[in-house]
Image (tube, rainbow, N blue to C red):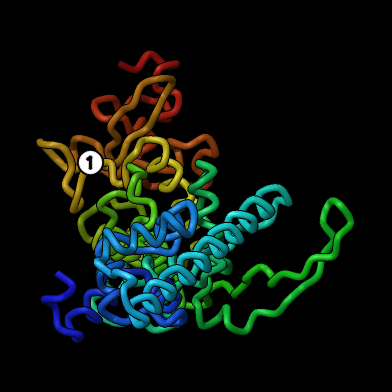
Amino acid sequence: MAAAADPAAQSRYLKENVDADFIFLLEEHGVDLALQFAIGQHYKSIRTFAAFADDRGTARTAITSDFGVRPESAADRARVACVITAWEASKLIREEEAKLRAEAKVLGVQKPLASSDRAAMRAALETVRGYSVPESEEPAPEYLAHKLEQIENGEPTASYLDEVISRKESNSLQLQTSLDNQGRLRVMRQKPKGRLPQNTEELRAKLRLEASAWVMLSAKCKGRAYLQDLRLSHFDRYLEFLLGDKCYNMQVAGAAPTSSAAQAERHTLAVPWNVLLQYEFELRKWAIKEAHRDGEKGEKGGKDGKGPKGGKSDGKIKVGETWYDLVSKTPDGRELCYAYNIKRGCQVKGCQRIHACRIKGCQGNHPAYQHGAQGGS
């Protein structure tokens, strides 16, 4: 296959299928393009190539049998030598990376994100986006490493929006010194910290960056059920809900809806910005927790916003050991109060929504979390 492909096709294959740092390693040690292409058919990263052989003798035998390079001339022996030196360098890199990760785990500091992993995740993001992603739209490596560590520990959670920063913002980060448990002085980069969004456009940009981060994480952690089939459209719909007429631009009646005319007199409720940001964080935190626990993506109604057959789902609630479907309106179309159905309770004086259980088919005179205790079925 290597002999049949022209140099342009070989370069294109390497760019699309092999880790960039592995290609650089081969180039740095003088491995020619044709041999890079032959190696790239089977080895895509430094970590896998490091396990190519156990010693030099085995490596030389494998190079001859696998890639057809016979050391019968000075030129061919030089080609073999280039591959050998690249292989030895890959072993050292793998060992040092393993040491860094082990040391980070022991000292309780954040594990570094390998450049090959970040490049692969970035390529996955650009495939989804459909264009070359600028630094302002690419999550910072430090943030991705932090989220990967959460996933590895089985404790994914939401981050405050001032912690969600781009690669462009992280380029200006500075170093800090600290003492570890054994009294050794360590120098590391400061934990990334941005700022909270101040308006709707900044909020859109932050959540778009957060969406990119989770798409990149799903490409890296393909075995996690709650990250499979994750799409940007999920975050787009979430943003539409957050800034739509059901949240930030909520329309409320000016008076009790005693007539159709009074019902028509509605105005926008001025939601305090800090309240919206806190609500957004709690909502995202809940969604991640539920998705992780149930192996889903947080949309209980199914893909593309479609609920189970027979109607749209408004979510679920777990009471005791049983899950129940929730509804947002009574059978006659009146809106149910969401706040009444949580433990904090409704704090709105003269609330115009119906204070009844949101569990489908109940609507009893009790909040949803007390459904079983009140004799609900």
Identify the residue at image location x=53%, y=49%. 150
Find residue 162 and report its image quarter: bottom right
Compared to 171, does 284 lie above or below?
Answer: above
Mark 1: few, some, or many residues within 10 Å (few <14, many ≥20)?
Answer: many
The percent coordinates of residue 361 (x first, y second) are 24, 26
In the image shown, does 340 or 314 lie closer to the viewer? 314
Compared across the picture, whether 105 is left or right of 15 comes to: right
The percent coordinates of residue 31 (x first, y second) are 37, 78
**Which image quarter holds the N terminus?**
bottom left
The percent coordinates of residue 354 (x first, y second) are 35, 39
**Farthest right residue in view:** 183
Compared to 322, does 22 lie above or below?
Answer: below
In the image shown, does 351 or 203 lie closer to the viewer? 203
Compared across the picture, whether 368 is left or right of 233 comes to: right
In the rendered image, is residue 290 in sight? yes
**Which image quarter holds the C terminus?**
top left
In the rendered image, is residue 250 in sight? no
The amino acid type, in three-letter code, at marker 1 is Ser
Kindly state the secondary structure of the residue where label 1 is placed. Answer: loop
Reading the image, the residue beneath label 1 is 313
Identify the residue at image location x=55%, y=39%. 344
